[in-house]
């Protein structure tokens, strides 16, 4: 299905689902789950709303869900409660007989949209002209299948926030430079943690088609795509200063998609799973300001009433695209399956999937 076809189908959900009360929607979801049984598998990302995540058969971050998708061979239907690129990954790692469904096609990722194939191919040509064949690409899993395929085709691999350090070390074992896309902040924070100086990094601006660096070009080891997460970029050093001033005993933990200066001033930084595990293992009475998506922060507050937990940014909104997956769309997708109709199926063309899986498998082999 092309983009225009997808856009035309975005409002296909019957209006009756929007009119239903929450209790009725939840009862319908439970009933379909029970009737479909093992034919249905529902993975849910940690950033999903509580109203949806309660029905997930498994929750996780990108790496966990990628592994579950790769191992799943039993379900006929995989209703993915996440965003588009995650559903693409699930489609690529499961069999052709399995249908991957995204309840609302509008559940995308602004970061993934910051790098399209045309831009990346032009950047790659320009960088190779300047620096020769010294570069291996790495792509964050928060990217389209087309970009993953490009990276696989050019000898690179995917990364997650959980394994970015290991994958960057692997990349440097292949060639002397790394082209990291689409999240400049994860790339910068990871490279710096590996001992690479800021003057050894450059930023490729895909709109200006310029390479921005503070040091000499020949010293550049990491080239960062100028992209970011619209949620995590909104955490600031001013918010950290406020916590330090008003809650001096409170620890600050942030996601590595945050800006460099935020990660440097925080007490700790790590993937979604790392943040969850850190809070779970923290002693009762401890205080935490968390710099990540609001749905997850609120869930951690509910799960750990023995700890004081706040968002580093109290005015932070949840991830808007992730929140497109709501109960009405979820129930519509489930009931449509039971009626013999697969709505919003996500399929990756075979030639794209082959090269994208190459990049994914290089990561999974090392993870």
Image: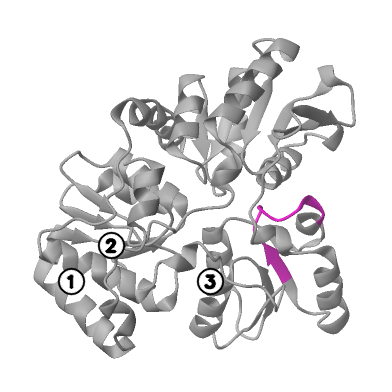
Mark 2 surroundings within 10 Å by alpha-carbon count, few (fewer than 14), some (14 through 19), many (20 or more) = some
Instruction: Using the rendered view, name the quadrant where residue 359 is placed.
Output: top left
Q: Look at the numbered disc 1 and give the secondary structure of its residue.
A: helix
Q: Which mark is residue 33?
A: 1
Contact check, label 1 and label 2, Cβ < 8 Å: yes
Residue 300 is one of the magenta-drawn residues:
no
Residue segment shown in magenta: 252-261
- Work out how far the residue at label 1 is from the one at label 2, CA to CA, in angstroms: 9 Å
* Picture coordinates of residue 210, whole percent (x, y): 78, 28
- The residue lying at 48 percent from left, 54 percent from top is 108
- The residue lying at 78 percent from left, 51 percent from top is 260
Question: Which residue is identified by label 3?
Answer: 296
Quarter that holds the N terminus: top left
- On screen, residue 99 versus residue 194, left or right, reads left
* Picture coordinates of residue 367, whole percent (x, y): 46, 40
Q: Is residue 163 visible?
A: yes
- Work out how far the residue at label 2 is from the one at label 3, CA to CA, in angstroms: 18 Å
Q: Considering only order in the chain, which callout, 2 or 1, is on the residue closer to the N terminus?
A: 1
- The residue lying at 54 percent from left, 49 percent from top is 162
- Work out how far the residue at label 1 is from the one at label 3, CA to CA, in angstroms: 24 Å
- On screen, residue 152 versus residue 278, left or right, reads left
- The residue lying at 15 percent from left, 52 percent from top is 76
Q: Which mark is residue 42?
A: 2
* Picture coordinates of residue 164, whole percent (x, y): 59, 41
Q: Is residue 170 visible?
A: no
Mark 1 surroundings within 10 Å by alpha-carbon count, few (fewer than 14), some (14 through 19), many (20 or more) = some
Q: Considering only order in the chain, which callout, 3 or 2, is on the residue closer to the N terminus?
A: 2
């Amino acid at each position: 299905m092309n983009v225009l076809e997808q856009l035309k189908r975005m409002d296909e959900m019957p209006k009756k689902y929007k009119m239903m009360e929450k209790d009725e929607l939840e009862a319908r979801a439970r009933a379909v789950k029970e009737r479909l049984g093992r034919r249905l598998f529902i993975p849910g990302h940690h950033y999903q709303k509580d109203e949806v995540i309660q029905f997930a058969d498994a929750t996780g971050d990108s790496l966990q869900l990628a592994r579950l998708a790769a191992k799943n061979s039993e379900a006929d239907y995989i209703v993915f409660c996440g965003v588009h690129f995650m559903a693409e990954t699930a489609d690529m790692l499961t069999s052709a007989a399995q249908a991957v469904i995204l309840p609302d096609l509008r559940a995308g990722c602004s970061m993934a949209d910051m790098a399209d194939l045309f831009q990346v191919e032009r950047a790659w040509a320009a960088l190779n002209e300047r620096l020769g064949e010294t570069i291996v690409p790495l792509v964050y899993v928060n990217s389209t299948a087309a970009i993953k395929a490009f990276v696989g085709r050019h000898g690179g691999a995917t990364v997650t926030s959980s394994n970015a350090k290991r994958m960057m070390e692997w990349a440097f074992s292949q060639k002397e430079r790394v082209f990291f896309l689409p999240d400049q902040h994860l790339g910068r924070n990871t490279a710096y943690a590996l001992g690479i100086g800021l003057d050894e990094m450059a930023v490729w601006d895909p709109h200006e088609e310029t390479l921005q660096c503070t040091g000499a070009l020949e010293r550049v080891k990491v080239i960062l795509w100028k992209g970011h997460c619209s949620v995590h970029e909104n955490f600031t050093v001013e918010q950290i200063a406020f916590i330090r001033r008003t809650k001096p005993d409170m620890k600050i933990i942030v996601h590595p998609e945050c800006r460099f200066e935020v990660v440097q001033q925080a007490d700790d930084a790590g993937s979604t799973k790392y943040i969850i595990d850190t809070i779970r293992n923290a002693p009762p009475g401890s205080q935490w300001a968390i710099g990540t998506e609001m749905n997850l922060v609120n869930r951690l507050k509910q799960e750990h009433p023995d700890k004081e937990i706040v968002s580093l940014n109290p005015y932070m909104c949840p991830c808007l695209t992730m929140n497109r997956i709501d109960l009405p769309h979820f129930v519509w997708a489930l009931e449509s399956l039971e009626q013999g109709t697969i709505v919003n199926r996500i399929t990756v063309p075979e030639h794209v999937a082959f090269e994208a899986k190459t990049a994914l498998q290089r990561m999974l082999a090392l993870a």
